[in-house]
Image (tube, helix red, strand yellow):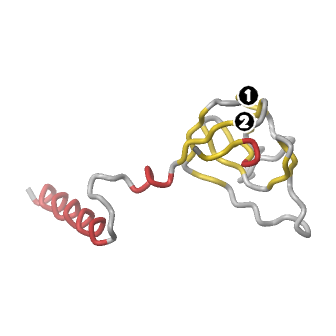
Amino acid sequence: MKRRLLQVLLASAVTATTLALGGHADAHPAAARCVTLQVTGKTAAVRKPRGNAVSASPSSPVQYRVRRGDRLRSCLMTHNRTTYRGQTLYTMCGRGGVDWYYVRGGQIPQTCVKVV
């Protein structure tokens, strides 16, 4: 009985906090941050970072390839701000960039996709 009461109180506190912040009680906070990506390059490789690296690199192993028009779902993005004198870390799909989107199975360069 005590455990059930604590669950109800916790659920009502979360709902009240969500509504006070202007959200909806049934909306999942992570769902609002997720985006759908459409591949803009002819083909793009989804890469997995090596070892303990946070972000993939052009030399990271390829997990699979996607083609132009394919749609992917991403809820997280790397923000690599450690470039040397403003230089880009990679040049892929005809543009230079530094950030990667996390997708199923690995990461894809920001320059190869657009947010839909």
Which amino acid type is marked by label 1?
Answer: Arg
Q: Is residue 36 left or right of residue 3?
A: right
Are the two marked residues, 2 and 1, in contact with CB atoms closer than 8 angstroms? yes
Q: Nearer the viewer, residue 30 or 38?
A: 38
SS at badge 1: strand
- Bin the neighbour count of mark 1 within 10 Å (Cα to Cα): few under 14, some 14-19, many 20 and up: few
Residue 84 place in picture, x, y as percent: 90, 66
Q: Residues within 10 Å of mark 2 (few under 14, many from 20)?
A: many
Name the image quarter holding the N terminus: bottom left
Please give the residue where the numbered disc 2 appears in the rendered image. 46
Q: Residue at x 64, y 30 (%)?
A: 70
43 to 37, vertically: above or below: above
Name which residue lies at 26% across and 57% down.
25
Q: Residue furthest left?
A: 1
Q: At which x and y percent is residue 71?
A: 60, 33
Quarter of the figure with the C terminus: top right
Q: Which mark is residue 97?
A: none
Question: Does residue 116 sit above or below 33 in this rendering?
Answer: above
Task: Check disc 1 and report the residue beneath it.
Answer: 65
Distance CA(mark 2)–CA(mark 1): 6 Å
Vertical order, 39 against 100 (above or below): above
Which image quadrant is residue 7 in? Answer: bottom left
Tell me how many marks there are: 2
Horizontal arrangement in the rendering, residue 60 relative to residue 115 (left or right): right
Counting from the top left corner in percent of width and height, residue 32 is at: 44, 54
Q: In this view of the protein, which residue sits in the foreground, 88 or 105?
A: 88
Mark 2 or 1 closer to N-term?
Answer: 2
In x, y percent, where is residue 6?
A: 17, 62
Amino acid at dot 2? Val
The answer to whether residue 38 is left or right of residue 40 is left
Q: Secondary structure at mark 2?
A: strand
The residue nearer to you, when weighing 31 against 55, is 31
